Amino acid sequence: MKKSDFTILVADDDPDYLFQTINGLGRAGYKTIAVESQAEAESVISKFKPSLAIFDLMMESDDSGFILCYKIKKKYPDVPVILATAVSKETGMSFSLDSGNDKSWIRADRYLEKGIRPEQLDQEVMMLLKI
Amino acid sequence: MAVLKVLVVDDEPGIRSGVARILRDFHVTYPFMDEDYTFEILDAPTGEDGITVIERDKPDIVLLDNKLPGMQGVDVLEYIRERKYDIMIAMITSYASLDVAVRATRDGATDFIPKPFTPQELKSSIENITKQLYLKRITHKMQQEGKKIRYQFLSVLSHELKAPLNALEGYLRMMQEKQAGERIDDYATHIDRSLQRIHGMRSLIMDLLDFTKIRLERKEEKIQEVNLAEVASGAIVTAQPLAIQMEVSINLEVRSDVVIMADPGDIEIVFNNLISNAVKYNKFGGRADITIDSSDIDAILIFSDTGIGITKTDSENLFTEFVRIKNEKTRNISGSGLGLSIVKKVVELYHGTIKVESTPDVGTTFTIRLPKKPLNIS
């Protein structure tokens, strides 16, 4: 399968970050769906199964990303999920998802620091989609 | 009613049973304490036994005889100190030589009880120790909470500062790689958005300065007569450029020309924030009405707008730092999320009150009451 066969759902309430992520993924060759809130993401998920999802952690609430991870994994257990956020460094919270314990409750496949380069993101996505 | 465990380490059985008898029905109470303290007595005939009890029962207070058969009182003291246990220690000693007293105090003994002691002497020592223990614990607790709040604030703050930088970096990279085309015009949106993020970041930094100013500055020396109508007029001028863009009319009604005692800078912060909110969160062509009134004791400031309003759920967190109401209507409005928390801090500094009433899509009204003569700023 080629990249254009995959549709990636991106949810982020920072319009600039959303625009740039979508732009980067589009240039890499993926199809994309952009939403700006947890609510919109939920409504997309209810009707459509994306190939992969990238969620911002803090949107309407501080744990929007976690909630979305949980919901999408419940409906489509095989869809890989990336949690992207800027909070880890500042809060010291670490969700590297190395331990089985973290994985079971966060339910994301990757945890990525915001501000990552488009090429890096493409690498991560290719790995998760096994391209 | 809280129970403190008191361990008596003494080789004389008479002292051990005496302490137990004296403290059995004793309770300590001070007006500043949340509850009374009573005592449960544990005892040990030697220092070695005492350490066993300390490890097993974690007492709050240890009454320690210095002269013991095996290890000495001061050794037990050192044992406790080295492990940094949260225990108050009083030495019971018959011949309080200066040498022992100095060493014991250095090692953390809080009190000395001369032997033999009367019941009254023991009780007043215990009373004193309990008070110190209480104060020590409450201070520790308050420091922990303070640390936690500061930490949360800093972590959200760095998040808020980092987001615009990420956005700028992203746009600059896109331009560097000429992703949208060869001409500068191809990047009009990128540049516009970058400028908006810079603007947002600048206002966050300005708000942050206000915020720290309120937190840090003692103001007594800056208190003077402040004419509220004058400050309001100044703030309206400041908000005018945005109001013109939004075609919002700002109206000031002075029902009572109130003068209050305050730091003019604080009052400017209140007016600037609430008037700029009334414009920013308004509808195109709306109104912002500012009313200045007074009662016998209070100055009353009312800020009414015909804006997008706030739901009841959202209004609960409205004054919390960095909380911004996020929805379809607010997504293009920039703000630091600090403005209203700053306003609330100022109002509280002057022992005033602020309340908000709002109907979504109809408008919001903030009502502030400030005592005319607060002076006692805390």
Image: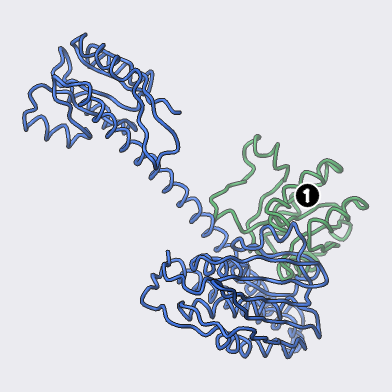
- How many numbered callouts? 1
Position in image of residue B363 (x %, y %) = 78, 73
Residue type at mark 1 is Leu
Q: Nearer the viewer, residue B288 or A117?
A: B288
Tell whether B260 sits left or right of B274. Answer: left
Q: Nearer the viewer, residue B113 or B211?
A: B113
Position in image of residue B209 (x %, y %) = 49, 73
Q: Which residue is mark 1?
A: A68
Residue shown at the point (86%, 57%) measured from the top left: A7
Q: Residue furthest right?
A: A47
Which chain contains the residue that carries disc 1?
A: A
The residue carrying pointer 1 sits among few (fewer than 14), some (14 to 19) or many (20 or more) residues within 10 Å by Cα, namely many
Tell whether B2 sits left or right of B10. Answer: right
Quadrant where the C terminus of chain B is found in the figure: bottom left
Residue shown at the point (43%, 67%) measured from the top left: B377
**Quadrant of res B37:** top left
Residue B367 seen anywhere in this rendered image of the structure: yes
Position in image of residue A99 (x %, y %) = 62, 37
- SS at badge 1: helix
Q: Which chain is blue?
A: B
Q: Which color is chain A depicted in?
A: green
In this rendering, the answer to whether B280 lies above or below A109 is below
